[in-house]
Amino acid sequence: MDNLLSSLPQTLDGEAFESILEASHVRIERIVSRGHTSPDYGWYDQDEHEWVLVLEGAGTVLFEQGPEIHLKKGDHLTIPAHSRHQVSWTDPETVTVWLAVFYR
């Protein structure tokens, strides 16, 4: 047993990605941010669908074809495969903990 809100990194030079589960058609990650955004190289364009839930904090996901969606604790969002997107903001004052489920 483990707790997604325990053992959070004390310092974050960049976002922290932790694999929770991997199987043939699904991958689950915990992502921890604090004022981090997507890398400058461009948009995420994933082969998998992604369902993301904010467990703590807040963040904003921007889609290349619109809109910009602000998520706070308890909010979740489905990002279809190949929907080009990026994280444009996470709360710089508190840690944001995301649960991301990638599936085909």
Image (cartoon, rainbow, N blue to C red):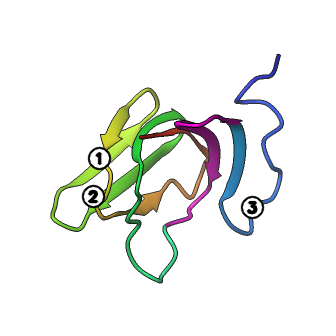
Q: CA distance from mark 3 to mark 2?
A: 27 Å
Q: Is residue 74 magenta?
A: no
Q: Which residue is mark 2?
A: 83
Neighbour tally class for label 3: few under 14, some 14-19, many 20 plus, Cα within 10 Å: some
Q: Are marks 2 and 1 in contact (CB under 8 Å)?
A: yes
Question: Which tag is nearer the camera, tag 1 or tag 3?
Answer: 1
Q: Is residue 70 above or below residue 39?
A: above
Q: Position of residue 13 (x, y in %)?
A: 74, 69
Q: In this orientation, which residue lies closer to the viewer: 93 or 52?
A: 52
Q: Is residue 16 left or right of residue 57?
A: right
Residue drawn at x 16%, y 61% as measured from the top left: 66
Q: Is residue 70 left or right of residue 47?
A: left
Going by the numbered disc 3, the residue's amino acid type is Leu
- Among the two numbered marks 1 and 3 on one chain, the one whose residue lies closer to the N terminus: 3
Residue drawn at x 49%, y 68% as measured from the top left: 38
Residue drawn at x 50%, y 66% as measured from the top left: 37
Q: Is residue 10 visible?
A: yes
Dot 1: element: loop
Quarter of the image with the C terminus is top left
The magenta-colored residue range is: 21-37
Q: Position of residue 93 (x, y in %)?
A: 59, 53
Going by the numbered disc 1, the residue's amino acid type is Pro
Q: In this orientation, which residue lies closer to the viewer: 24 or 53?
A: 24
- Among the two numbered marks 3 and 2 on one chain, the one whose residue lies closer to the N terminus: 3
Q: Position of residue 84 (x, y in %)?
A: 30, 64
Going by the numbered disc 2, the residue's amino acid type is Ser
Q: In this orientation, which residue lies closer to the viewer: 51 or 38?
A: 51
Q: Which residue is mark 3?
A: 12
